[in-house]
Image (cartoon, rainbow, N blue to C red):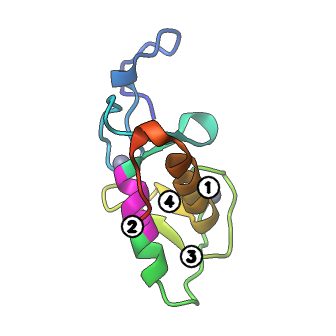
Amino acid sequence: MLRPGADPDNVQMSDVLCDFCHAMWTADLPFVEGHQGHVICGRCVRVACLEVESVEGGAESTRQCCMCLEDRPEPCWASPLDAQARICRRCIEMAADALEGDAESGWQRP
Ligand SMILES: [Zn+2]
Ligand SMILES: [Zn+2]
């Protein structure tokens, strides 16, 4: 998401905040973009990977994933800060793949 007050026509790295933990995008914190300006940082992807794996099979999402904007019947991870910020398992996997594929990020799947 964009920092409140940011100029959408002149977005700087520091104007981009993780939707899930509200951390600022910096050179040493990799971000993954979703739809409509929603982003998740590498730290949150790591937590989401761990927590979604610990969900016992039956947990179902009834709310929209904010990364793909789909309402998917599968486990998802919600931000501890903002229950509206949710990411489905598929998007967690895609984000983890993207981060792992980016050698410069140094990100590793937990
Ligand atoms: Zn984050
Ligand atoms: Zn999704």
Quadrant location, the C terminus: bottom left
The kind of residue on which mark 3 rests is Pro
Q: CA distance from mark 1 to mark 4?
A: 14 Å
Residue bearing the label numbered 1: 94
Q: CA distance from mark 2 to mark 1?
A: 15 Å
Residue bearing the label numbered 2: 110
On residue 86, the disc is 4
Q: Residue 4: x percent and y percent? A: 36, 26
**If you read the primary sequence from the N terminus, does the residue marked by circle 1 or circle 3 appear first?**
3
Q: Is residue 26 left or right of residue 55?
A: left
**If you read the primary sequence from the N terminus, does the residue marked by circle 2 or circle 1 appear first?**
1
Residue bearing the label numbered 3: 75
* Mark nearer the viewer, 1 or 3: 1
Q: Residue 5: x percent and y percent? A: 36, 19
Q: Is residue 37 left or right of residue 17?
A: right
* Mark nearer the viewer, 2 or 3: 2
Q: CA distance from mark 2 to mark 3?
A: 18 Å
The kind of residue on which mark 1 rests is Met
**Residue at x-position 40% and y-position 50%:** 107
**If you read the primary sequence from the N terminus, does the residue marked by circle 2 or circle 3 appear first?**
3
Q: Main secondary structure of the magenta part?
A: helix
Quadrant location, the N terminus: top left
Q: CA distance from mark 4 to mark 2?
A: 20 Å
**If you read the primary sequence from the N terminus, does the residue marked by circle 4 or circle 2 appear first?**
4
**Closer to the camera, 31 or 88?**
31
* Mark nearer the viewer, 4 or 2: 2
* Mark 3 CB near ligand 2 (8 Å cut): no
The crowding category of the residue bearing disc 3, from other C-alpha atoms within 10 Å (few below 14, some 14 to 19, many at least 20), is many
Cβ atoms under marks 4 and 2 closer than 8 Å: no
